[in-house]
Amino acid sequence: MQIKRVAVVGCGTMGGGIVQTAAQNGFQTVGVETSEQAAEAAHARIAAGLNRSFARGKITEAQRDSALANFTISSDLSDITDADLVIEAVFEDVELKKEILGRIDKLVAPEAFIASNTSTIPLVILAAATTRPEQVVGAHFFNPVPSMKLVEVIKTPVTLPENVQTFVDFAKALGKSPVVVNDVPGFIGNLLIVPYLTDAIRAFERDVADMESIDEVIKLGFNHPMGPFALSDLIGLDIVHDMAASMYEEYKDPRYFPPTLLKQYVRLGWLGRKTGRGFYTYDENGARS
Ligand SMILES: NC(=O)c1ccc[n+]([C@@H]2O[C@H](COP(=O)([O-])OP(=O)(O)OC[C@H]3O[C@@H](n4cnc5c(N)ncnc54)[C@H](O)[C@@H]3O)[C@@H](O)[C@H]2O)c1
């Protein structure tokens, strides 16, 4: 099956980036948000993303204009019915995702594919919420989606190989470099990065050093583009928290247990770059202040 029409449910940090990338690469794309207001805000964010890509010379004016014409954002889930592929990108909450996937399953054609952008939830749990588990894959894009090349494509024991291949081909059509991974909690990326982030936060809690110093050691000592606190702010502290909690649930390894400080910041609404404050503070242009 060839994918032509794409739907993305949940157009926040990741879903918005997926809509932008799909529209930029010629796919007719519909995004779905929770309300008209949220849909309008998502549309404005995606349009701003396209304008930024144009301003930075990553896409031409014509590409920007055709991308703007290729996507719509709706507040009505039934607008996904024509999609060949639906990508779910709502909050990292297993019950919410199961509920949404069940609704998606009822709305789209029997041959359509369903993908989830979950970071840590076992794909089999989500596949089982549909009547087509062999057509469900994990589509773990990385943030920011328009510029990050990697997509982890997660297959369960029941995903048909040809369906994995269809999704791999779709990811390549988006200009991505897909890596196929088996369905283990955290896949490859988060299996390794989440305990690193929680270890860094606990190191700060133990007063090993301040956050800037920990970030500096990782940047200068290991040539990472940013340290664990800046990276947590980029990912979103709520997302880091939810990934850690979900992986702790699965592995019961204390390294995954969400650190107290992380929980406190999330409860304060300090979620990182997206709220202007996380471990660091940011101005309206996203620069550290
Ligand atoms: N942030 C990252 O770096 C990152 C990276 C890879 C994967 N992920 C995963 O992607 C998913 C989304 O994360 P995010 O960072 O984009 O979160 P986010 O909070 O930025 O966006 C989630 C969006 O889903 C919308 N939403 C919630 N319920 C909905 C519903 N019923 N119908 C339609 N929309 C709904 C919300 O309004 C919000 O805009 C999570 O599963 C997360 O684990 C995140």
Image (cartoon, rainbow, N blue to C red):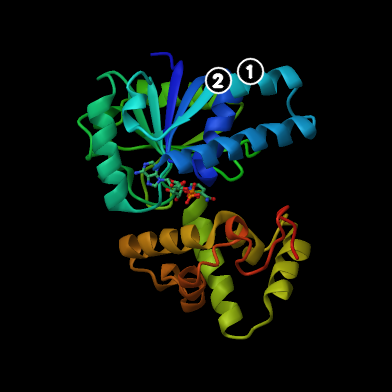
Question: Could you say which is closer to the camera, residue 16 or residue 217?
Answer: 16
State the residue position of label 1: 66
- Of residue 222 and residue 39, the one placed in the foreground of this image is 39
Residue 209, which numbered label? none
Q: Position of residue 246 (x, y in %)?
A: 36, 60
Give the spatial CA distance, label 1 vs label 2: 6 Å
Callout 2 amino acid: Asn
| Residue 25 in the figure: left or right of residue 248 | right
What kind of residue is marked 1?
Answer: Ser
Residue 207, given in percent of the width and then of the height, sits at: 62, 86
| Label 2 secondary element | helix
> Would residue 151 be seen by someone viewing this image from the given angle?
no
Q: Is residue 200 above or below residue 75?
A: below
Cβ–Cβ under 8 Å for marks 1 and 2: yes
Q: Residues within 10 Å of mark 1 (few under 14, many from 20)?
A: some
**Residue at 72 percent of width and 17 percent of height:** 62
As displayed, is residue 165 above or below residue 243?
above
Q: Which residue is mark 2?
A: 70
In the image, 37: left or right of 245? right
